[in-house]
Image (spheres, rainbow, N blue to C red):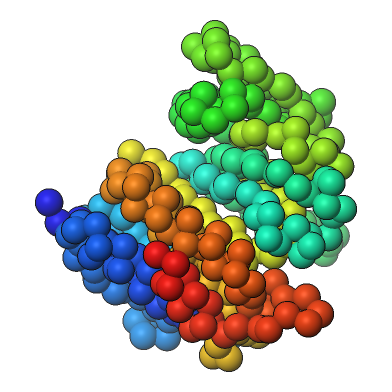
Amino acid sequence: MTYKIAVLPGDGIGPEVVHAAMQVLQRVLAESRIAAQFSSHLLGGAALDATGVPFPSETEAAVTSADAVLLGAVGGPKWDTGPGHLRPEAGLLGLRKALGVYANLRPVKAFPQLIDASPLRSEIASGVDVMIVRELTGGVYFGSRERGELASGERFAYDTMYYAEREIRRVVARAFAAAAMRRGKLTSVDKANVLDSSRLWREVVQSMQGEYPDVTVEHLLVDACAMHLVTRPQSFDVIVTENLFGDILSDEAAVLTGSIGMLPSASLGDGAGLYEPIHGSAPDLAGQGLANPLAAILSCALLLRYSLREETAAQRIESAVKQALAQGARTKDLARAGDSVLTTEQMTEAVLLHL
């Protein structure tokens, strides 16, 4: 079998980190004798410049026929003045919709070699190993919205947080399954003391507990969870929450590792998975060779694990990253006083060396 992998470099540092990740992925595939066919396509600002739309039909056709999709990043100030449907982020939302991905998995793991890069005390950051499962296609990002003007001339705007039970159930099932394969603890995060959508979320989670007798469930309000992530992060195993809360909490948790440049992600549904670093396009770093490629490289490990079911190959990548860090490899975002700073290319070479 030959796997079809669609590659979307995107904007900013996206092309740089995707190029790095592809070097590692292709080396592992070749050495593992796993056949794969790659094709590159436009998304986001790059697509806007070339075609006038952020998610071209050619890209949509390619990703919907692929076995997995590797994405760099989208967005940048260059495209911030256009209407909502002609911004890079609209391309990303369209991509997620086309793929039908509804569960975003973000592993947050503290590497022992990088504990001194975390803003938290070492005894708090050490040993952190959390999987955040974020609902991806519902909630306030996709609810009805409007902007207008009152008769008095005052402007108004509203966004609606909407969830159907089916949308909650399917992502929570993913989270329960992840917890069952890990340490058996699931933390469901909501705002049930205020929001009706959160009350429904909590009710659905409670109704599903009996299906997973080996998983312990706790419920936390989102503000409490935000606090506990920086005071007792070691207590978390799997966190599941809705779209907006997950967006915020996962970026907060990224700091636990010392740099957002270390966090990969997998967006899963019933078809091809979407794999991307969570750090965004970082336009201020683009073209300088300073971007940390490790999140993109680790996203390839998730691609191998979840879409290609090649666990041994996934572990090879993760092991190579750990060894490179253990040997002192540091990009600018990870370096401390006295450390040698590697370029994107040099960090990639350090990972390749340890495969």
Let me know if residue 43 appears in the view: no
Residue in the foreground of this view, choosing between 33 and 95: 33
Q: Quadrant of residue 140?
A: top right
The relative height of residue 16 versus residue 208 in the rendered view (above or below) is: below
Q: How many marks?
A: 0
The reply, left or right, for residue 247 in relation to residue 48 is: right
Quadrant assignment for the C terminus = bottom left
Tell me residue 289's x, y (percent). 55, 87
Q: Residue furthest bottom?
A: 288
Tell me residue 54's x, y (percent). 42, 72
The reply, left or right, for residue 270 in relation to residue 208 is: left
Please report the residue visible at 87 percent of the width from the left and 53 percent of the height from the top.
121
Q: Residue furthest front?
A: 327
The relative height of residue 74 versus residue 99 in the rendered view (above or below) is: below
Tell me residue 298's x, y (percent). 48, 59
Q: Quadrant of residue 300?
A: bottom left
Please report the residue visible at 52 percent of the width from the left and 14 percent of the height from the top.
212
Please report the residue visible at 70 percent of the width from the left and 34 percent of the height from the top.
236
Residue in the foreground of this view, choosing between 279 and 327: 327
Tell me residue 354's x, y (percent). 44, 67
The reply, left or right, for residue 274 in relation to residue 201 is: left
The relative height of residue 322 versus residue 187 in the rendered view (above or below) is: below
Please report the residue visible at 43 percent of the width from the left and 59 percent of the height from the top.
317
Q: Quadrant of residue 28?
A: bottom left
Residue in the foreground of this view, choosing between 66 and 184: 184
